[in-house]
Image (spheres, rainbow, N blue to C red):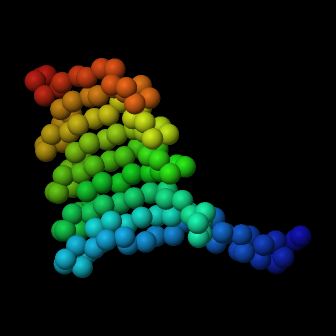
Amino acid sequence: MHGLGALLLVILLLPACSVHKFVAATHPNGKPEVIVYMKGKGEDAEKVMEKVYYPNGQMEYVGHFANGVEDGEWNYYYEDGTRKYTEHWENGLENGVQYDYAPDGQIQRELHYDHGKLVNEIDRSHMP
């Protein structure tokens, strides 16, 4: 296939693997509360990302999924937009370093996970 035929094939294949956005819930003020991103169609559709918002429209958290479970980095925010938590997931288990942030943006605590098991906690709230 060359030229137009190859282009048409690419255009036809793109929708089959694209991600679709759905507003799953709204706040009483009409702003989105939960937005879900799905890949695939019908019963084969798989959630790949979720975004949740405060009533003021500011993002509360965003997280990714793989094979139906949490995977990758998840970020949580205070209502003013300052980062609140950062988590790392692998196949539905917390894995790696998670950070808890104070409202001023400073790291308060580090939680170190090894495939779902908390192995170390560092309290940074009293460190200079």
Query: Which residue corresponds to the image point at 21% horizontal and 55% vertical from the top-left?
Result: 81
Q: In the picture, residue 121 is in which quadrant?
A: top left
Q: In this view, does 90 lie to the left or right of 6?
A: left
Q: In this view, does 119 lie to the left or right of 70?
A: left
Q: Where is residue 34 in the image (x, y as percent from the top left)?
A: 33, 65
> Is any atom of residue 7 visible in this view?
no
Residue farthest to the front?
Answer: 43
Number of numbered markers: 0
The C terminus - image quarter: top left
Residue 62, compared with residue 44, is above or below; it is: above
Query: In this view of the protein, which residue sits in the foreground, 126 or 53?
Result: 53
The N terminus - image quarter: bottom right
Q: Position of residue 30 (x, y in %)?
A: 24, 79
Query: Which residue corresponds to the image point at 31% horizontal and 71% vertical from the top-left?
Result: 25
Q: In the picture, residue 114 is in which quadrant?
A: top left
Residue 124, compared with residue 93, is above or below; it is: above
Query: In this view of the protein, which residue sits in the foreground, 69 or 49?
Result: 69
Q: Is residue 5 left or right of residue 113?
A: right
Q: Position of residue 90 (x, y in %)?
A: 47, 37
Query: In this view of the protein, which residue sits in the foreground, 83 or 16?
Result: 16
Q: In the picture, residue 17 is in which quadrant?
A: bottom right
